[in-house]
Structure formats: C-alpha cells, structure tokens
Image (tube, rainbow, N blue to C red):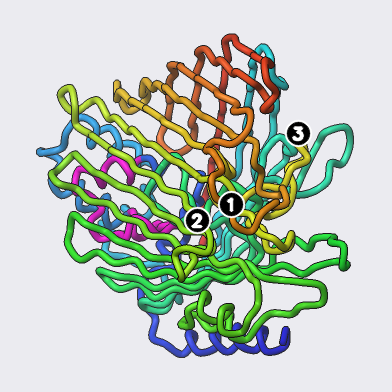
Amino acid sequence: MRRYATAILTAGICLLVCFPVFGAGGCNQDVTLDSWIYDAVFELSTQGEFAAILLHTKPYTRGEIVDGLSSLLSHTDRLTESQRIWTERLKQEFAEELTADSSGSERKGEYVRLGGGPTARTDQYRHAYAKNRVGFDVVGSFGTGGGFSTRTRVRFDSDGRADSQFHGEYWKQKFTAWVEQAVMTLHRGRFHLALGREYWRWGRSPVDVLLVSDHSPPFDGFRASYRASKWSFMFHATALDRMITEQGLANRYLVAHRLDWRPRTNLELAVSEVMVFGGVGRPWEWNYLNPLLPYYWEQLNNKVNDNPLWNLEFSWRPRTGVELYGEFMADDFQIDFHSEPQQIGFSAGLAWSDLASGRLFVNMEYERVNTFVYGQDYPHNRYMHFTDFLSGRPVGIGSNLGTDADRLTFRPRWHQSALLDLTGVLEVVRNGEDRIERPQYTPEPKGIKFPSGVVQRRFTAGVGAHVQKGGNLVLDFSTGYQRITNAGNLLGQNQSGPFVLAKLTTLIWKTFGI
C-alpha cells in the first residue's frame, strides 16, 4: 500500500508539471504561519481589503499579499490610520515584489533567497518555570519562474524544548538545533502542491483554531489544492509519530480534506473533515488517500474504529470594519444522535476595527472544547502529535486548550505609528481534569459536568507594546498580573503574581538571481 501511495504522489506531481505556467516564482512562496503578516491581513480584511484571498485557508502566498497591498496603494488618499500604518510595514516587507510589479518585469529565471537573524525570548512569572532564551534562525529558499519553489528554516535555540512545536534532541546542556521547515511547492495555474515539512492551519481566528492548528510540531506530509476566485478544495495527508501500545509499535496517519467558499464578498464558509487512523503494522489506506471520499462513511461501512472529526467555519462582515466569525467542530459524529452525546467544540469571535479615529482595533473571542473531545478508545487514534518535552504530555493537533477547557479573550490594539502599537490582553481560562491521552472510561459519557473534576482557573490581565521596523525587526513585550487557582487541577494550589513576556524576532534576507 505504501508503494501505491508513493505512486499517487509522484503521478500527481508529474501531471501538474504538464499544465501551463502562470505567475512569477517569488510570488508563489508561502508566508510562514508565525509571520506578523497574518495579523495585518486579519485586521485589514475586516475593513474589506484583501477581498481576493480565501481568508480561512492558510498559508497565504506572497503573491496574494502583494495583490491586496497593490489595491491599498491604489487609493492611499482614503486610507485610515490603521490602514496607513499596516501599509507602510507591508511596503517594506514586499519592496522587491512591488518594484518588479511597477517596472512591469517578472522573474523568469532561477533565484535564491537567503537570510536569517537572532531571536530572543523571556518568560518571567514568579511561580512558573522562567525561560530566558536566545537563538538564531537561518532561512533559505529557491525558486523558478515556472512556479516551483523550496523553503527551509533552521532554528538554533538555547532551549527550543520550551516550545510545543519543537521535536528533536538537545546537543549539549539545553542547546537545540533542528530543521523546522523544509518544503517544496509547485504552482500550476489554480493548482498548488506542497511536499515536505511544514505547519498547517485552518480557520479565521488569530487566537486559536479547533481542527488543524500550528500548535503541534510540523507535519512531514503532502498538501494539494485547487484555488478558484471564490472557492478552493484542499487535501492533506501526513504520517504522525508512531506510538508504543500494548499490541506493539503502532503506525499513525492523518488525512484531511476541505472546501472553502465565498458566496458573497462579505461572507466566507468552510467545511472540513479529518481522519486519524493507524495500528500495529497498518499501512496507508487506499480509500483514505482518495480526497473525494467521505471518510466518516468509509470507516463506518468498513466497520473500523478510526477517529473522524468534522468542522464548520464562517466569517461574516455585516458592515465595513465589523466582522463576526466562528467554528463548530464535532468529534466522531454520532449518526443516530442518541447512542452518546456529540463531543463538540466551538468558538465565536468579534473583530472591530477603525475605532477611535481609525487607530483602535478590538478582538474578542470565546472558545470551548467539551470533555472527551480529541480522545478515542484506541490510543493510536487520539488527536495528538509527538510529546511536549517540559510537561511530558502529548501535544494536541487541534486547539491549544486541549480538551475539557474554555477561554474568553479580549485583545485591544492601538496603532500609534508605523513603529509602535500599544496592546492589551484580558483573558480567563478554565481547564477541567480530562486530557487527550487519558483513557475514556465510558463509551457513553453522559452526564459528565463541564469542566470536569477539580477545575483550574487562570486570569490574566496585561498591557504591552508591539515594536516593528518594516518586516526585519519585531519586538513584542507585555507585562501584567496573573492569578491561577487550583493549579494543575490540585485543589487549593493557588498562584498569583506579576509576569513579563518578551519576544524579539529579526530577519534580514537578500535575493540573488542565478
């Protein structure tokens, strides 16, 4: 079966090579999911900008951002303060692409883009593990005028194990170095292929998403999509980390498909389905590699106990500057509606821009993941990928809340200048006792209170600053107060005190024609 899977991927790549070429190589580069560019697009799109991008399906390409930025630059006399500030930052980041557009030139040959820069983080909280880290990122990409490109990022860090996304070993003391991303992409008209190591993220929220997030370590897998002007279809496949079970070493896999649709300029809808499956000696399944088949029906008709999840998303802009968005996720949907409660998660958010003379942006969001969500009877089918080094617990593929938790978040941002934003956060999080890796003690979890058991409650209030110099230097700093009751779900274990968080990211790069 693995030979068949390899043959399918190879045939797909060869087929797309035969299609005619559209677009320049540099513009086909994907924007990495941790980039500040996504915050810019999120806010500007609530104001009706970047209307040509299907906003729920990430990553975006640099070409898509350049098109939206060019539209902004065509009416600079009507820009609000926030639009003007974001535009100035984006102009510096995409200066090379904008110069090529203005001269009417298009990169026809091969190019290499090399860069990097130091990073630094501090996380000081009186009752928690204090993390002070320094590192260096090295990035490189190669592209052609024919739509083919590669992207690689290597991260050196004094203690990368502090991130849930890290997977590797330390060299000496706590020093870590690893290839975080290494992916090849190919664009042929509306077809887009990607093969290699990268993060995936589906959803509108800038805070968190429920189904496929970039919270876990990156996936070594395959991604294919067809993107039209108002809709897109996407298919993902990856092998997850193998797991030691009572029966032996179990293989684990994830496949997903997704339809994203914009019926109106102010409305976007998306529906997705994910299947996690595996077992000792179990290979890839031919039916799950077919992106058009409904996975839920396949596992039901074949009488196998795999783990399907469904997700619905929406975003609606009733007027310029105001947007409502949300998700609804069903874990292992019960078709009879009564054998057991539907294990669900949902989120709802509001984005409001151009307040206070166009300088204030506010984002509010509530998210809830019910008890037993992401879990499953078979350990190898649970919705997780690798293990967090510090906590020793598996890392979830979906929400960074895990299961049995909810969160209310309020995040204002005041645009002072192209160099400085003032930020704030007010957040309340509740965590019950359930965990994704915990065996589900009943197949019919009726009457279980949410959140379950002894509930940990965390209250955070803080203010901060976002300092940015173009796209080359970004510093996020925040300080405030945090109170945790029943820490670690232990009754009476309370913690409180001030905190200081800071993150510095620098990236200087240059493009060479070859």
Q: Nearer the viewer, residue 241 or 502?
A: 241
Name the residue: 47% across, 63% down.
Answer: 338
Q: Is residue 290 left or right of residue 2?
A: left
Sequence order check: which comes first, mark 1 or mark 3?
A: 3
User: Real-space Cα distance between discs 1 and 3?
Assistant: 40 Å
Disc 2 residue type (three-letter): Pro
Would you name the residue on which mark 1 appears? 445
Quadrant where the N terminus lies?
bottom right
Sequence order check: which comes first, mark 3 or mark 2?
A: 3
Q: Nearer the viewer, residue 94 or 119?
A: 119
Sequence order check: which comes first, mark 2 or mark 1?
A: 2
Q: Secondary structure at mark 3?
A: loop
Q: Residue 61 lies in magenta, yes or no? A: yes
User: Real-space Cα distance between discs 2 and 1?
Assistant: 7 Å
Disc 3 residue type (three-letter): Asp
Q: Nearer the viewer, residue 239 or 194?
A: 239
Would you name the residue on which mark 3 appears? 159
Measuring from the top left, give residue 291's x and y in whole percent. 49, 80
Q: Secondary structure at mark 2?
A: loop
Neighbours of disc 1 within 10 Å: few (<14), some (14-19), many (20+) = some
- Residue 142 quadrant: bottom right
User: Real-space Cα distance between discs 3 and 2?
Assistant: 42 Å
Measuring from the top left, give residue 270's x and y in whole percent. 35, 63
Q: Nearer the viewer, residue 385 or 453?
A: 453
Q: Do the residues under discs 1 and 3 have CB atoms within 8 angstroms?
A: no
Looking at the image, the residue that sits furthest to the left is 78
Measuring from the top left, give residue 392's x and y in whole percent. 78, 40
Would you name the residue on which mark 2 appears? 341
